[in-house]
Image: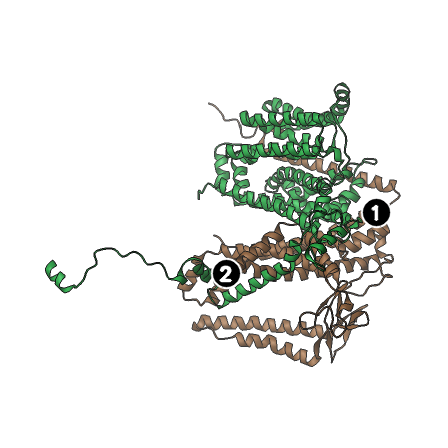
Chain colours: A green, B brown
Amino acid sequence: MSDTHSETVAYVRETMLPPEPPPLAESGAIKWLRENLFSGPLNIALTFVGLGIVWLVVSTVGPWLSHSVWNAGSMAECRQVIAETWGQGATGACFALIKHRWNQFMFGFYPQALYWRPVLAFGLLFLALAPVLFSESARARRIVLGLSMALTFVIAMVLGAPMAALMGMAVLMLAWAALIETRPQWSLLASLVYPFIAVWLLWGGSLWSEAMVLAGFGLGFVVWRLLAARFGLLAFALAVVAAVAWWLLLAGPLASMLAGVLPLRLRPVSSDQFGGFVLSITIGVAGIALSLPLGVILALARRSDLPVIKLLAVMFIEFIRGVPLITLLFVASLLLNYFLPPGTNFDIILRVIIMVTLFAAAYMAEVIRGGLAALPKGQYEAADALGLDYWKAQRLIVLPQALKISIPGIVSTFIGMFKDTTLVVFVGLFDPLKAMADTIRASFEWKGAYWEPYIFVGAIFFILCFGMSRYSMYLERRLKRDHR
Amino acid sequence: MVTYTGADNPPFRLSMLIYDRRYRSLTLQAIVFILVMLAASWLIDNTLRNLSAMGKTLSFDFLFRRAGYDIPQQLIPYNSDDTHLRATVIGLLNTLLVSIMGCIAATILGVIVGVLRLSSNWLIARLMTVYVEIFRNIPLLLWILVCLAIFTEVMPPPNAYRGENPAAEMILFDMIAPTNRYTAIPSIGMTNPPGTISLGREGISWALIAYVVVIAAAWTSWRLLRRWAQRVQDQTGKRPRTWWISLAMFAVPVLFLTWYFGLHLIPPVLRGFNFADGINLDNAFVVLWLALTLYTGAFIAEIVRAGILAVSRGQTEAAFALGLRPRRTMSLVVLPQALRVIVPPLISQYLNLTKNSSLAIAVGYMDLRGTLGGTTLNQTGREMECMVLMMGIYLALSLIISAGMNVFNARVKLKER
């Protein structure tokens, strides 16, 4: 058999041929270009349109950006440098303005000697968020915490914080970091205390007033825990009454008494000295922190079986969602004094935070309601079958899953709210965008600077908001359990 | 013998209001209701006392007094002798104008960008991603200010268009001239105008009525035609070719009316220091419209992209397997499913755009907030009444839009059994 075969076939190759390289048009960059840019007449046309757009943008903005000046004291000096370096008639960006007005962009009219306080408050924010944000990997957590602590310390030092403040800062941060590393459960408590520390650092005054407010919460919690076993729902009402009574009757005198014994005072800073990104981030963080719990409560109320509560929630949500934020801010600045007893006058930033929180909470409630509705009915039934009561079922079974589903919506509400903090300019606060740009242009040195402040502020907002949206994508991936 | 003494129905005790689940919900609701009512009455009481302390009463009389201020852009006749009420209506119309124009333009932009972002062309897809991410992550206020700066700083003054060799050139076939004070666009003229009916001080041209009637008639007959075509298809299995009849039904009467009235565009012409003949659009409007369009367009692009991606490929393949042509696959299988995903968030974007149009405050466009919540409020000093009225109007607008959305949702909802 094999003999005949060898006779009929004249030649048999016994070694494998090495594979030929693919044709030039089917490999490497050319293949990629052909597939992604020039795969058909329409695609070719689109590519050229795209190139045209890129060329248009680069040719108009490119020279202006590349002729940028980073060291100058005024617009005139800037123009002179540009004319000297790139010839008469050249236009260029004058980013020297940002360097010149950096402190104002960041801190508004905050007293210069106290710049370390907002910096510290912002640095501590990372420590407070550690149990929530960086719990997954110990290494990432240590890197983030170490970096933020070191940066806070160095920046505060550069900004001229007094020696005592630096010492206190170092002790506080190291102790907190040690708490996070050794007793993660307890660090959650420290995170709850953080808002009070931040308020104290930002506005100054006596620490005891913040401490007394906090003590009211503590008292309420203790009352609730002690009585919950005996009185159930009634204990909650009693806890609220105890806390309110504490705030109204005891907190004020006690705070002034303790302040007399041990004065823990920082120089007070009034709200009209706030401005720039300190203002935006203060309002943004406060709004984010307050609107999520409020949104959860509103969403649960709107899905509740109790008609009165449901109706109230629907009315509140639809009203807030139906009017522009600007009108709510105007209500805060124009009308709030009418609604309160004669003679009351409270802080404008606090009013704005309340309004922004209510606004974001209504949107948040709708997002979370979507998550609650998307949860299969079986989950609710399983919780009932286990004999859990309403709050236990929500806390242990329903909300963790519903919140996970609604992460993208929650984060985009956060982003929207953070962007909306720029609207506070219309009630007379010093936001980093419009008020800042107007102030800069009104000054003699920087008359005619239109684009540079916008580019700078826009870039910072972009980084923060884009960062938030990327973080939410990471969180979604991390929490995905892939059960169908 | 043991008798069962109704444990189901124990006598009512006061503690059951708290411990019995049947009564507890009632107790809770009653308490919440009383607390809310107490809070509301406390607020109202404070308000009334504060108002009387300032010597003010709650009254909407000021709406019928002379306004005494001018409004640059007005859709219906208005001058400073008119009442505050009319100024409010002008403001509301301006809000509606910029919102509607913004919604239309943003939808067009958003659909184009959303589709192009899914394009296989790498460069275009990247460019569109950059556009969407940049506009979504930067506050709208910044875009309004940037557009304002472009229009006040970059655009030429009207007299730059003058002369043999002008410094600036009009765009779009010499039809539009953006300047640093206004944007001149062509107006519509008629050589054979049919006259107007006057309703008070406003006039409605008969031509407009004629167009509305003709288009409504064409639309009705188009529905009838489609029903007929469907019937033929059901009976014979072949769908008659109707596209040219539908096209003719719309085009022929409209073209005839246009020819009959001698409808044409009058391009703006520079006379003296300013453009005349055309319409000089207030730049505040143009800036606001542009910024709202670009900003909302980015959001709509994401919605459109998500909607297209939501229809699985199996649907298209199934339609092809059934022998549907690509166009009918698109119109009968893909679009209805994609629209179900797209429309609800799209309408909430329209709502957002309408509310965001109150940022007109940044450019001085006289919308509802500019008239009622701005000049009227400052002149009359009636903060309470003006704010309540303004919020009421915005609330009514968005409730109307949401009601429309609910009707749509109910119509396209999957009928599950």
Determine whether, in the image, residue B9 is placed left or right of residue A69. Answer: left
The residue under the point 59% across, 76% down is B249
Q: Nearer the viewer, mark 2 or mark 1?
A: 2
Circles 2 and 1: CB distance less than 8 Å? no
The amino acid on which the numbered mark 1 sits, given as a three-letter code, is: Leu
Q: Residue pushed farthest top?
A: A261
| Frontmost residue, B341 versus A427 | A427
Chain ID, mark 2 = B
Residue named by callout 2: B121
Q: Is residue A406 visible?
A: no
Q: Is residue A299 above or below residue B229?
A: above
Check disc 2 and give the amino acid type: Asn
> In the picture shown, does residue B211 fall above or below A298?
below
Q: Which residue is denoted by mark 1 in the rendering?
A: B58
Q: Give percent across and percent down for residue B132.
A: 59, 54
Question: Tag 1, which chain?
Answer: B
Q: Is residue B92 left or right of residue A179?
A: right
Percent position (x, y) of residue A330?
A: 76, 46
Position of residue A171 relative to residue B29, above or below, is above
Taking the spot 84% from the left edge, 63% from the top edge, the residue there is: B79
Q: CA distance from mark 2 to mark 1?
A: 62 Å
Residue B19 to residue B79: above or below: above
Q: Residue furthest right?
A: B55
Front residue of this view, candidates A299 and A93: A93
Q: Residue at x 25, y 55 (%)?
A: A16
Which residue occupies 57% across, 72% down? B222
Position of A307 with respect to B181 (left or right) is: left
Looking at the rendered structure, the secondary structure element under dot 2 is loop
The numbered mark, 2 or 1, whose residue comes first in the sequence reads 1
**Crowdedness of circle 1 by 10 Å Cα count: few (<14), some, many (20+)?**
few
